[in-house]
């Protein structure tokens, strides 16, 4: 059955996550047995009722099924379905929509095709094809030396191999999965599982030998990703205008692969894989967020490896733009800086593309995090009426909200003016684009709307633009 994760609830009593989910047959709650689920993602799953159902008590015959067939109330998951098959050992198949739920029952069974109601206090959800293992440790002994252009390319080859291998296994597994769906004798499957002392879900898994290999490849990939972030050179992105701290972070300046979704630097901020051994980075308490734009300088990114272009790339902006929300609060500012990025088909590192970073800061007296800077009725979106960006950097510069790092390699001091020497005024082309097949570009496309409001001086703020 396909479910969509609505909410994840931590669970003290069990190692499993508890999730609220929705299906086309209603919604419910259950224990998740698999990798951490992702909210609003859909998964193909199997349910297992973690208790023997007693006829007349936790499973009863009803006049007719009710709508919705799945619901959750007072800590009980209620399921309505049709009794489709019964087995001498008390096993029963119950059809809910077009899925079959297999349960173990105690007591005398009603007739086939009866409508039944199940009330379960503990339901386990097994995600079908997403059961991978997360890395537990990261081996420090692995080569953690900063990449050279040569070792970087060798690294990408290794990473690409895992992507290819995973794709191959996925194809094979799909074939097995299709074959298994044709296996209609559920009783036979159940007996095999019972004899082997494993659950039916486990049995189905063992019938698909690729799954284990896929786990291994994925594990290898997660280690390779850790290696990647540890080996990237650390760059200065900004200096805090309030305390002077240098904002440092690993950045891939060898190629655009740093924007490949699986190697994107935003990975640094999420995922349990980093807790034990995060790569080096330095922020201060005033740091809010850093955003980036990538100017392709009229080049076509056809240097990217073909395996990386099979996946959808993030939308990117070709010119730097200001994110309005932090800057309409009091005592906030941003710092812009640029770094050159090379291409994979150049023998040495040249300045082919340009990344612009804009790092946002909030001073201790800011009202950025106060209620008035949000519109709670609007799903807690920033109070900017759905307009998030401004391309007019000069406006923010003149208001004393935007600064830049001196591009001089030896003197990366914070520059607050004058406007005449600002190096990033009106960079072209402006707009957003996507990297698609063969490294071709879709875009740049112009923005739907940009901020037309004022750039206020730091001591003023612009709360509650909309209600
Ligand atoms: Zn600071």
Image (cartoon, helix red, strand yellow):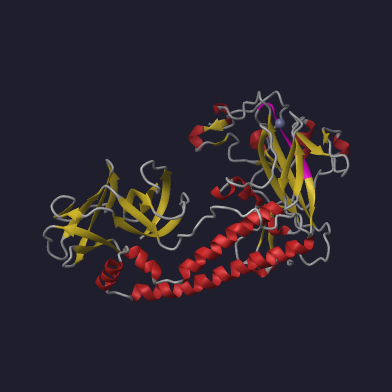
Point out residue 84 in the picture as x, y percentages from the top left corner.
21, 66
Q: Nearer the viewer, residue 459 or 261?
A: 261
Q: Nearer the viewer, residue 415 or 387?
A: 415
Question: Is 59 located above or below residue 75 in the figure?
Answer: below
Q: Is residue 455 something that shows in the picture? A: no
Point out residue 102 in the picture as x, y percentages from the top left corner.
26, 62
Question: Is 396 located above or below residue 276 in the figure?
Answer: above
Q: Residue at the spot x=64%, y=28% of the render?
A: 462
Q: Residue at the spot x=53%, y=33% of the render?
A: 375
Q: Residue at the spot x=68%, y=24% of the render?
A: 460
Q: Residue furthest front?
A: 141
Q: Is residue 323 something that shows in the picture? A: yes
- Whether residue 462 sits left or right of residue 10 in the image: it is right
Q: Which residues are magenta?
A: 330-337
- Whether residue 287 sits left or right of residue 56 in the image: it is right
Q: Quadrant of residue 240?
A: top right
Q: Quadrant of residue 411?
A: top right
Please say whether residue 332 is one of the residues in the magenta stretch. yes
Point out residue 264 in the picture as x, y percentages from the top left corner.
65, 53
Please say whether residue 40 is one of the residues in the magenta stretch. no
Ligand 1 location (quadrant): top right
- Whether residue 14 sits left or right of residue 285 in the image: it is left
Question: Magenta span: helix, strand or loop, mainly?
Answer: strand
| Quadrant placement of the N terminus | bottom left
Q: Nearer the viewer, residue 296 or 84?
A: 84
Point out residue 117 in the picture as x, y percentages from the top left corner.
20, 53
């Amino acid at each position: 059955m396909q479910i969509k994760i609505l909410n994840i609830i931590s669970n003290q009593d069990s190692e499993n996550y508890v999730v609220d989910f929705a299906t086309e047959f209603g919604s419910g709650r259950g224990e998740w047995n698999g990798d951490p689920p992702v909210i609003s993602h859909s998964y193909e799953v199997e349910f297992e009722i973690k208790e023997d159902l007693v006829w007349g008590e936790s499973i009863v015959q009803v006049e007719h099924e009710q709508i919705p067939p799945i619901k959750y109330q007072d800590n009980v998951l209620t399921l309505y379905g049709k009794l489709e098959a019964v087995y001498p050992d008390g096993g029963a198949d119950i059809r809910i929509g077009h899925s079959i739920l297999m349960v173990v029952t105690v007591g005398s069974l009603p007739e086939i095709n009866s409508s039944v109601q199940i009330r379960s206090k503990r339901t386990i959800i097994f995600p079908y094809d997403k059961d991978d293992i997360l890395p537990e440790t990261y081996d420090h002994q692995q080569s953690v030396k900063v990449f050279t252009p040569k070792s970087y390319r060798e690294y990408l080859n290794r990473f690409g191999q895992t992507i290819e291998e995973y794709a191959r296994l996925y194809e094979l597994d799909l074939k097995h999965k299709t074959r298994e769906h044709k296996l209609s004798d559920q009783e036979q499957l159940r007996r095999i599982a019972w004899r082997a002392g494993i659950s039916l879900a486990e049995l189905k898994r063992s019938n698909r030998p690729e799954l284990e290999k896929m786990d291994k490849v994925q594990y290898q990939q997660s280690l390779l990703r850790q290696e990647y972030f540890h080996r990237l050179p650390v760059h200065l992105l900004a200096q805090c205008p309030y305390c002077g701290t240098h904002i440092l972070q690993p950045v891939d300046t060898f190629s655009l692969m740093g924007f490949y979704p699986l190697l994107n630097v935003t990975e640094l901020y999420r995922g349990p894989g980093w807790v034990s051994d995060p790569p080096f980075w330095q922020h201060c308490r005033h740091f809010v967020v850093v955003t980036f734009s990538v100017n392709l300088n009229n080049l076509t990114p056809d240097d990217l490896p073909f395996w990386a272009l099979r996946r959808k790339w993030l939308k990117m902006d070709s010119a730097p733009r200001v994110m309005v929300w932090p800057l309409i609060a009091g005592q906030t500012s941003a710092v812009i800086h640029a770094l050159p990025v090379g291409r994979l088909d150049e023998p040495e590192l040249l300045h082919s593309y340009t990344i612009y970073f804009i790092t946002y800061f909030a001073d201790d007296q800011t009202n950025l995090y106060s209620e008035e800077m949000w519109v709670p009725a609007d799903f807690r979106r920033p109070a900017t009426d759905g307009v998030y960006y401004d391309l007019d950097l000069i406006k923010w510069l003149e208001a004393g909200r935007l600064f830049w790092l001196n591009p001089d390699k030896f003197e990366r001091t914070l520059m607050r003016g004058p406007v005449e020497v600002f190096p990033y005024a009106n960079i072209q082309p402006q707009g957003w684009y996507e990297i698609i097949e063969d490294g071709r570009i879709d875009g740049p496309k112009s923005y739907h709307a940009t901020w037309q409001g004022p750039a206020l001086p730091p001591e003023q703020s612009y709360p509650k633009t909309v209600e």
